[in-house]
Amino acid sequence: MSYHHPKVSMQHQECLSGSSGKHIMWGILLTLFFLPTFLSAQKYAGVWHYNTEKERILTGVSWEKFVETDAKLRKKKFRLADLEITASSGGSRRYHGLWHSGTDSCIIVTKSWKEFKSRWDQLNGTEFVLQDLETYKQGRERRFIGVWREANIQQQIEVDLTWLEFKDRWEKLAADGFRLVDIETYVDGRDRHYAGVFHESTLDYRLWVDVDWNTFKTIQKGLIDQDFRLIDLEVYRNSNGKRFMGVWLSGKYDTKYFVDMAWSKFKGKWDELDRDNIRLVDFEVYK
């Protein structure tokens, strides 16, 4: 299944605190940082843009270590920019984070979509916007984690939709002046679902889903020639094997992307691009 829409084509310094079941933290950033804590068969993919911000990355740690690291980075003025969650072979979850220089982000963890949506409603209109959405299963519960940033723009969120439902909402929201900035896909039972974060914008846009790697590379090359930049990359598996999904917005500046890299090679590429002020803006961790 692939889909391309030809054209109808993202200060307040406090996030709402939660009870003991929720974790709140402020993201923050300044120099290069690496903790070699995740050595496994995981693969990494990433999207890089030209950016003079500094960055730091942490991969494959427990939630407690993630929170501890974030607290240290906050003191050095780093903000959380992207979060990934994976499950180990034993079933425990591992957390991976990317921080950029700044002091304007927070993260909220909830136990259900209803609870998450309530938090989203509370933060909506407070100059915080959701920039990254993650979801995972714990037992029978589907849980949600969101990273917010300070920005005075309108936003929308959609979750738990079939592809046809998601495409319909994507088209309608685009017509109302909202652009997809983050897409997630997951399986509940036998059914694949989609979720997305939309920001108010007038930029042109593209979306492709469920394509193989060679097709994705061809699409990316064509869109670069049309002055589009890749802003979100998703890697997942279905009955057709490994599949790729991408979100593009119009914009002409240097963009790099790499997939299927072992951590050592990914870290090496990260170091190399950092020297040219090409910063990681989105990454995936998968098997």
Image: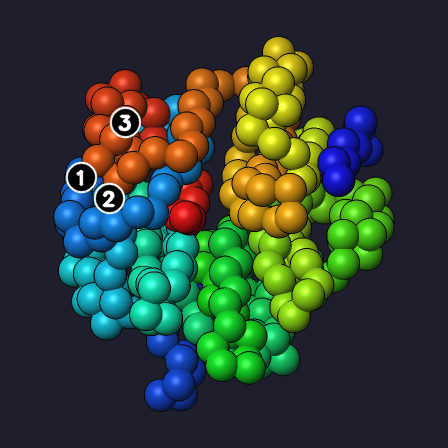
Residue placed at 22% from the left, 52% from the top?
38
Q: Is residue 226 above or below residue 197?
A: above
Residue placed at 15% from the left, 48% from the top?
36
Could you say which quadrant of the image residue 147 lies in? bottom left
First in sequence, mark 3 or 2: give its number: 2
Residue 32 seen in the figure: yes
Image mark for residue 31: 1
Q: Nearer the viewer, mark 1 or mark 2?
A: 2
Tag 1–tag 2 contact (CB < 8 Å): yes
3D distance between C-alphas at marks 3 and 2:
14 Å
3D distance between C-alphas at marks 3 and 1:
17 Å
Q: Is residue 48 above or below residue 40?
A: above
| Amino acid type indicated by mark 2 | Arg
Instruction: Please state if 154 lies on the left or on the right of 2 as rendered.
Output: left
Residue 28 seen in the figure: no
Residue identified by numbered label 2? 56
Instruction: Please state if 41 lies on the left or on the right of 189 as rendered.
Output: left
